[in-house]
Structure formats: structure tokens, C-alpha cells
Amino acid sequence: MARRTAALTSLAKGYLERNPHILQTFAAFSIKIVGAVLSFGFTILLARAYGPAGVGQFGLAVTTLLIASTAALLGTDYILIRTVAGDIKIDRRDLARGAIRTVATMVLVTSIAVAVVLTLGGVPLLQRLYDRPADGLVLRAVTFGVIPIALIRIVSSSLRSSGRVLFAQILDGPASMAIAITTVGVLHVLAVPTTVVSAGIAYVAGIAICVAIGAVVQWRDMRDWPHTPVPLRPILAQGWPILCVVLVGYSIDWLILTLLATHQSAVEVGIFRTAWQVTSIFNLIIVSFDAVAGPRIAAAYRIGDLSGIGRTWRQAVAIILGLSLPLFVLTLGFPGLVMQLFGSEFAEGATVLRILALAQLVNVLTGPIGSVLIMTGGERYSLGNSLLSLGVALLTALTLIPLFGLTGAAIASALTLSVRNLVGWAIVAFKLKLPLLRR
């Protein structure tokens, strides 16, 4: 028995030595789990204090801010990871520093412009679409949040691609959420009157603080690097398809939430978004692997190591599936119990949770396919796939939400996610001819 244990220990040790990124991936996943716990805590806080309508108002605002900040990024956050990781791989830190400075400057300018446009034109337009005037209350108060939400993506991308993966993970999620929860909690303890608008402002402020911390750390890391100016135009030429991909993804979520708010109310939006947030833990696991695997895939592709890319993807799928099994048991076997954690009003979202969880099974089995596609230069294929998924979302959401309400929204979201992942896998495996399956 002792000999067998020693043999297994030696085998595991050898595997980890050959694949050192596995431990880093688990560390990144642990950080994401902490972020998810904090995010759920914040949602429960909102649900208990302001009910489903408050959660719905907050969800509509955050989704809109994500779309607006994505427009401000112009796809450059993904290009920054690919470019800087590749530059460092071939020991051109001067180009890496130039790319970071060019992109950061551009995003600061564009995010300010987008925030102004959203304040003056976007909010009044959206206000007309919502079922009640109060549904857009949070958004009106936090339109300036476009700026820090866009900049945190650049700070995170810079840190990840230059080696500070775990620190970037902490800033882009757990830290900002902890600040928001602490702020709202302190206000409650001090008996200061608060509304869901206060929570929205605390959420944005937390992200802004993390942007400042990350920017200081990144500047200290690269202040001794040589500097070669990098022009913006080539980065934008690569970034616009990715911009469209990410924008379409957020737009699909926004479309479903807005149609639900139009035909139902912020209460149904709150229930749907809560169920969606529960199942987003599956995607959280995948994103944890993306954080570590993305720069590695980009670096491997830069030197032509296609077999290494396929090996990274296969390892990711196996581990993601194993980590996801307990959550599948909960969401598929006990959806009502899970939803009631947020309050008795959320119990009617049990069917929604189960439908969304089934779609996440496809997401898990295809693994970090979106990252593989983008990091290997397949952004135009990714754009085509995103436009296809947008068509599926439009068709299903416009048809099913007026007829079936919450259930229709869940089916529309599930079908869209499944189509996007399956088509993405087919593109990577057959069109780009990357070795995802063993031969």
C-alpha cells in the first residue's frame, strides 16, 4: 500500500512538474470562487434589502455598463494579451511597454466619450423601453462607471500577459466586490439610509479603486523596460472583430433582459438574472482557465506549437468537467432549493435555473474554446459565429419571451449559448485544424 501511494505521489509530482500551469490554474480558480462567493453575497444583500425589483434594476444597469465599456475598449483588451504575451515570449519588452501605453491612453479617451454619450442620449432612450420609470434609476446614477469598468479590463490584461495572473484575478472581481459589500454593509450598520442606487455607486467605486491599484503595480513593473512606440492603427485593425464578438455577447444578454423587462417587469428580470448568475459559476470555472491558458496559447501560437494548444485545451476540459459536477447536481437536482437561498420570491425561477444549467453542460464540454479561437488569430471566424448566435437570440427571444415569459427567456438564452459553443468548437477543430482531439 505504501509503495502504491509513493508511486502515485511520484506520478502526480512528475505531471505537475511537466505542467506547472496546472497549479496556477487552480489558484486562479480559487480566486474566482472567492469572487463568486462575494458576488453571490452582494446579490443576496440586494435581494434581501430591495427585493427582486432591486436586483432587476441593478442587473439592467450593470449589463448596460458592460456593453458601453466593451464599446470603449474596441476589442483592444484581447489584442493586448495576445500582443504583450507574444512580445515577452520573444524578449521584446520594449514593444510590450509601447503596446500597453498606446492601448491604455486610447481606452481612457474612448471610455470618457462613451460615458458622456450614455448619459446624454442612452439613458433617456432606454428609459422609454422599461416597464416602469424606476427600472432605469440605478443606470442614471452610475453612467460614469463606464470609465473604470473599461480600464479594469486593460489593467487586468496588462498584468496577466506580463506574468501577474493571480494578482490580476484578484483585482478584476474579488477585490472590487469586497469593497462594494464592505461599503454597503458599513452604511447599514451605521443606519445610514440606502437604496439600490447606493449599491450601484459602491459597486462602481470599488472597481475604480482596483484600477488605481493595478495601474500603480503595472507601472512599477515596467518602468525599467525600454520603450518603443507602438502605433494604434494595427491594434485597432485586429481589435474590431473582437469588439464585435464581445459586444454581440453582451448585447444578447442585454436583449433578453430588456425584452423581459418590456413584456414583464423588473421582478422577472431580477429572478432571471439571479438564476443566470448561479449558472455563471460554470463559466467562472472556464474563465479561470482562460486567465492562465490565454497568454500560454498566444505564446505557443506565436512559435507554432499547435500540439501544445490542443493539449492545453484537453486538460482544461477534463478538469473543468470534474470541478463542475457538484454544481450540476445542485442546479439540475435541486433548483428550487438553490433559488430560495435568495428569498421565497425567487422560487419560481427553479425551471429557469434548470434550463440554463443544461446549456452550461455544452459550455463545459467545449471548454475555453473562445479563448483558443481568439488567441490563435481566428477573430474573424469568431465574429461570424457571434453574428450567427445573435440571429438565434433575436429569433428565439422575440418569439418565446412574449409567449412564455421567464421560461421563454431561459430557453432563448440556452439555445444561443449552445449554438455559439458548438459552432466555435467546430471552427477550431476543422477550419483552423488545431489538434483538439487525440490522433
Image (tube, rainbow, N blue to C red):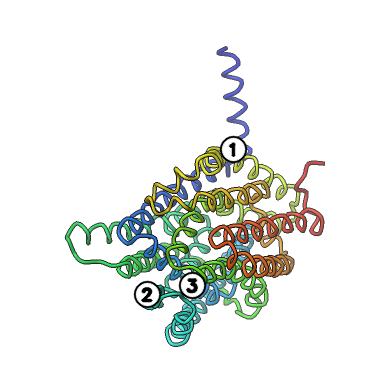
Residue 227 is situated, as x and y percent measured from the top left of the image, at 54, 72
56 or 402: nearer the eye?
Answer: 402
Q: Which residue is mark 3?
A: 64
Q: Is residue 128 left or right of residue 383?
A: left
Q: The disc labelled 2 sits on which kind of residue?
A: Ala
Secondary-structure class at tag 3: helix
Q: Is residue 79 left or right of residue 306?
A: left
> Mark 1: few, some, or many residues within 10 Å (few <14, many ≥20)?
few
Q: The disc labelled 3 sits on which kind of residue?
A: Thr
Q: Is residue 326 above or below residue 413?
A: above
> Mark 3: few, some, or many residues within 10 Å (few <14, many ≥20)?
many
Kindly identify the residue that appears in the image at 63 percent across and 38 percent down. Answer: 18
Considering every residue shown, the one lying at the far top of the view is: 1
Q: Earlier in the sequence, mark 3 or mark 2?
A: 3
Q: Is residue 23 above or below residue 180?
A: above
> Mark 2: few, some, or many residues within 10 Å (few <14, many ≥20)?
some
71 or 401: nearer the eye?
Answer: 401
Q: Quadrant of the C terminus?
A: top right
354 or 38: nearer the eye?
Answer: 354
Mark carried by residue 369: none
Kindly identify the residue that appears in the image at 52 percent across and 55 percent down. Answer: 163
Q: Which residue is mark 2?
A: 134
Mark carried by residue 322: 1
